[in-house]
Image: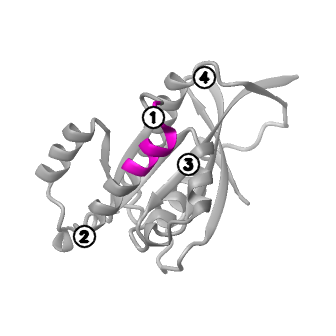
């Protein structure tokens, strides 16, 4: 037997050190990265079941925005959805997000309703917080995008981010070509999604 699978490419963008990799690894592997190692490029494939549909998220974790290259432009052209990451402990990283958001709109051209989720990380570091909830509400209204506050360390709202984006992509691209996948043997009980690092 074969299952129908919806496959979507996702790119994670933001400044260096804001917690992009920690966010992705927490979602993809259920682990917390405590050490910061600058990412060049990491790719994860995650099997997700949402509302009875078999989906695959092909997540690309990229280098910091300050190292924005032509390669990032290629990712943006190809991607269906975007996770824009800033740190709640560094207000200046919001400017990077705004620049990236505008870059996406410029590259995607006239495409409407681009699936995007904006993510503030390090929610657990309350004493170091610089970005207020009022600022987030104001930007969410101005940009018309969903914002999430997360903690990869404590696993707060991480899954919500990717499931919101997946829901947006499914609505935006309802005719996305389906792939057929051979049915594998059932695995033991575990997380609702399974991911592979590439």
Q: Which residue is mark 3?
A: 76
Instruction: Tell me if 183 is positioned left or right of 169 in this view.
Output: right
The boundaries of the magenta stretch are 102-110
Magenta residues: mostly which secondary structure? helix
In space, the residues marked 4 and 3 are separated at their CA atoms by 28 Å
Q: CA distance from mark 2 to mark 4?
A: 37 Å
Q: Quadrant of residue 117?
A: top left
Q: Residue 192 in the image: state x and y as whole percent.
A: 59, 41
> What residue is rendered at 38% in x and 68% in y?
18
Q: Earlier in the sequence, mark 4 or mark 3?
A: 4
Question: Given the current orientation, which residue lies at the most extreme left position?
Answer: 134
Q: Which residue has dot 2 on it?
A: 89
Under tag 1, what secondary structure? loop
Rounded to the nearest angstrom, the CA distance separating label 1 from label 3 is 11 Å
In terms of sequence position, does the residue under pointer 1 or pointer 2 come before the other? 2
Front label number (2 vs 4): 2
* Disc assigned to residue 52: 4
């Amino acid at each position: 037997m074969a299952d129908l699978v919806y496959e979507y490419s996702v790119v994670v963008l933001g400044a260096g050190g804001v917690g992009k990799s920690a966010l992705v690894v927490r979602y993809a592997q259920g682990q917390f990265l405590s050490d910061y190692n600058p990412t060049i490029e990491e790719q994860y494939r995650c099997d997700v079941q949402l509302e009875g549909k078999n989906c695959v998220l092909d997540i690309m974790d990229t280098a910091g925005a300050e190292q924005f290259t032509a390669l990032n432009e290629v990712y943006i052209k190809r991607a269906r959805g975007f996770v824009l990451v800033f740190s709640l402990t560094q207000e200046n990283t919001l400017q990077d997000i705004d620049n990236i958001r505008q870059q996406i709109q410029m590259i995607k051209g006239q495409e409407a309703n681009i699936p995007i989720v904006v993510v503030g990380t390090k929610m657990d570091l309350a004493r170091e917080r610089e970005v207020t909830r009022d600022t987030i509400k104001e930007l969410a209204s101005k940009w018309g995008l969903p914002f999430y506050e997360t903690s990869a360390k404590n696993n707060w709202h991480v899954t919500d981010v990717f499931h919101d984006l997946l829901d947006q992509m499914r609505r935006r691209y309802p005719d996305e070509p389906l792939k057929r996948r051979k049915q594998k043997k059932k695995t033991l009980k575990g997380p609702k999604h399974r991911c592979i690092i590439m």
